[in-house]
Image: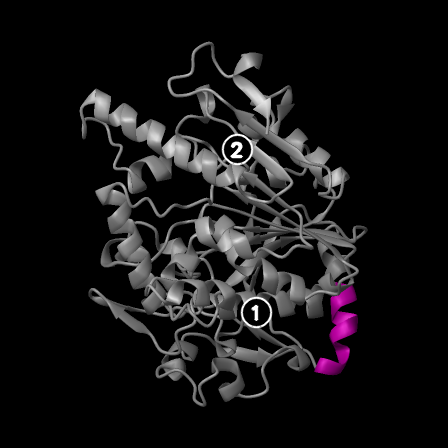
């Protein structure tokens, strides 16, 4: 067990039995990364706990957290290879509920590093450094913006152990490149899958998540995509007796080939597929299905990956029909960019693509709003006021998730606004909504 001596932040190690036994096993390559020594030099490690006392440490740690309401940061050893884009350690925030054997793990979103623009924003000095580096993450957080699904007063999971998984790999955790990749003027580590592997092992060995009774894996935006892409992996890491559920919010990203903007975004995902060395991480069935037309990168997109979700994990999807990200990035809907008639055509086109795509999924939970406050919404689970107020067929999103969960995901809860933009009569008009 190791701890980084760096202010008040703990960098937690994992019991040696849970980590790879050698660099070759860790990086699947036979050698450590080219500049691992340089990365490690930024941190000073001291051994603070023998492996034989790991179980006692776990009990002490849980007792210490019991009286604390804030989320506390856990970073992984740099030597584990679980690295953010800049080579700093990945990690998560944890809020323990010691009496509970239920866990919810929520994956933060934040787009992707698949071309120079968004990659450059994530380096120190960029616009979004916390999405590519852990160096500015605070030792404790309150996360007021997480709102609905992780709200300790109103969430259906409010009494559970809660994990907020920070997003700093910019690949929805499929990053699997052994060495840093040069994009533009910078070099980036794409080690997202190793962050996932080490993080799950850490939750199990240090905090006893392997003794859970049930686990909900959730996320929004790129975090929702991470949930979908890795749900089979999550299921394999835990005993089959542990109930597992998945909730994906605002993560149904499209291959919108009918728009130039959509074709450009698809080309960027194809680039990301190569940058990230994603193929070994994605579902091999999907990769084989698209390899003939040289389009295995499509397996990054939920539109295609959803066909390979595990049958033994119930899934709930919340998605605005007129998602802000989808309209802007995939259809080029921007103020003043198109004439009104063309803009309306594109808005309705994206609405149909998202609605038809989500409706076609073989999942038991759907919340598909489109009117009033839902127009232009991207993430809904993190908005406490929306999650607890916007109703379809008399149910809010939080209520629909609660009902779905109580039925263990086998009870179908599929709700949709059937109106087209712009919605007449607001989002409460009963005749414009239905169960699908």
Where residue 300 sits: x, y (%)? 42, 57
Where residue 8 sits: x, y (%)? 55, 61
Identify the magenta region: 51-60
Where residue 320 sits: x, y (%)? 46, 32
Label 2 sits on a secondary structure element that is loop
38 with respect to 339 (left or right) = right
Q: Which residue is mark 2?
A: 383
In the picture, the quarter occupied by the N terminus is bottom right
Indicate which disc residue 197 carries: 1
Q: Quadrant of residue 11?
A: bottom right
379 with respect to 298 (left or right) = right
Q: Which is nearer the N-term, disc 2 or disc 1?
A: 1
Q: Is residue 174 above or below residue 413?
A: below
Q: Is residue 31 above or below residue 39?
A: below
Q: Is residue 56 magenta?
A: yes
Q: Nearer the viewer, residue 86 or 337?
A: 337
């Amino acid at each position: 067990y190791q701890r980084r001596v760096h202010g008040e932040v703990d960098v937690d190690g994992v019991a040696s039995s849970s980590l790879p036994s050698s660099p070759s096993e860790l990086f699947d390559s036979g050698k450590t990364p080219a500049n691992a020594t340089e990365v490690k030099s930024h941190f000073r490690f001291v051994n603070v706990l023998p492996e034989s006392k790991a179980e006692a440490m776990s009990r002490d740690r849980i007792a210490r957290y019991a009286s604390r309401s804030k989320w506390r940061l856990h970073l992984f050893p740099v030597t584990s290879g679980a690295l953010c884009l800049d080579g700093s350690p990945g990690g998560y925030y944890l809020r323990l509920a010691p009496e509970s054997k239920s866990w919810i793990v929520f994956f933060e979103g934040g787009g992707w590093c698949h071309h120079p623009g968004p990659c450059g924003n994530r380096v120190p000095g960029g616009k979004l450094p916390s999405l590519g580096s852990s160096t500015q993450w605070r030792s404790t957080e309150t996360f007021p913006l997480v709102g609905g699904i992780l709200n300790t007063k109103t969430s259906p999971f409010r009494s559970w152990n809660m994990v907020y998984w920070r997003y700093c790999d910019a690949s929805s955790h499929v990053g699997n490149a052994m060495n840093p990749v040069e994009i533009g003027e910078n070099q980036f580590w794409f080690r997202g899958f190793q962050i996932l592997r080490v993080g799950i092992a850490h939750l199990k060995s240090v905090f006893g998540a392997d003794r859970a009774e049930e686990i909900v894996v959730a996320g929004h935006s790129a975090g929702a995509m991470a949930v979908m892409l890795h749900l089979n992996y999550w299921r394999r890491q835990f005993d089959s007796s542990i109930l597992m559920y998945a909730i994906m919010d605002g993560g149904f990203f499209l291959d919108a080939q009918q728009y130039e903007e959509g074709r450009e975004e698809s080309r960027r995902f194809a680039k990301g597929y190569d940058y990230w060395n994603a193929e070994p991480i994605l579902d091999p069935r999907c990769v084989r299905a698209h390899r003939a037309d040289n389009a295995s990168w499509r397996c990054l997109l939920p539109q295609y990956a959803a066909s390979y979700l595990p049958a033994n994990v119930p899934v709930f999807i919340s998605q605005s029909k007129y998602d802000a990200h989808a309209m802007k990035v995939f259809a080029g809907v921007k103020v003043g960019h198109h004439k009104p008639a063309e803009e309306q055509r594109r808005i309705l086109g994206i609405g149909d693509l998202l609605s038809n795509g989500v409706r076609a999924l073989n999942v038991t939970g759907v919340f598909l709003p489109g009117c009033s406050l839902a127009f232009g919404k991207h993430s809904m689970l993190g908005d406490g006021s929306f999650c607890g107020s916007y109703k379809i067929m008399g149910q809010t999103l939080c209520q629909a998730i609660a009902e779905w969960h109580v039925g263990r995901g086998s009870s179908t809860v599929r709700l949709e606004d059937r109106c087209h933009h712009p919605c007449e009569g607001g989002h409460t008009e009963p005749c414009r909504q239905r169960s699908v």
